[in-house]
Image (spheres, grey):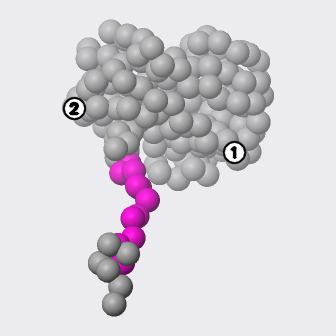
Amino acid sequence: MIPAQLLMVERPYVPTVQTFNPTAVLTTFTHTGGGAAEANLYDGNDSTNAADPNGVTAATAAAYDLGSAQNVNNVRVKVADSFGFSVADVFKIQYSDTGLSSGWTDSGSTISIPAGTGAIVNASVSSGSHRYWRILYQSGGTLGNGWLGELSFQNVN
């Protein structure tokens, strides 16, 4: 007979990911080959792309209204599989309790997007619950393409 302790198998921890869908968006990523570019950023499909038609500039940003205050602790970016980013760029992660176009506060976190295509990048955030979240260009290169396949604000437990 096998003791009960030997029959127990410890299962690996699998995190729960909650992705918050925006109720409104304010973004410079408004260019796409077809369809609604803003919706491409949060449609759950990594292969639908959106770009800033002016290339990456100091004003390149994407802001989401999550409808109510949400505890975001992870930001996920999927770089587009075609075009992608011409050079590596760093974006600030900011939040607001005022609106999509005002009251932004730096979260103290950034997300670094590599040059090239297809990368998936995650950045941790610990700023509490807020209704409005965005990424805003901070540094890197302001020349060339800046195509995203997806931008997600998440809570990972």
Label 2, on which residue?
68
Mark 2 crowdedness (10 Å alpha carbons): few <14, some 14-19, many ≥20: few
Residue 21 in sight from this viewpoint: no
- Indicate left or right for 40 with 112 as reference: left
Q: Decide: is 120 above or below 47.
A: above
Q: Secondary structure at mark 1?
A: loop
Q: Which residue is mark 1?
A: 118
For residue 43, side relative to residue 24 (left or right): right
Dominant SS type (magenta): loop
Residue 132: x %, y % from top left: 32, 24
Q: Mark 1 or mark 2, which is nearer the start of the sequence?
A: 2
Pick the residue in front: 122 or 144.
122
Q: Say if 100 sits above or below 30 in the image.
A: above
Residue shown at 29%/31% (left/top)? 71
| Quarter residue 94 falls in | top left
Q: In the image, residue 22 lies at what x, y percent?
A: 35, 37
Q: Nearer the viewer, residue 16 or 78?
A: 16
Crowdedness of circle 1 by 10 Å Cα count: few (<14), some, many (20+)? many
Q: Residue at x 70, y 30 (%)?
A: 114
Q: Amino acid at mark 2?
A: Ser
Q: Write the start and end of the magenta stretch as one range.
A: 7-17
Query: Residue 107, position in %: x, y?
Result: 41, 16
Quarter of the image containing the C terminus?
top left
Q: CA distance from mark 2 to mark 1?
A: 31 Å
The residue depicted at 73 percent of the width and 16 percent of the height is: 141
Quadrant of the drawing holding the N terminus: bottom left
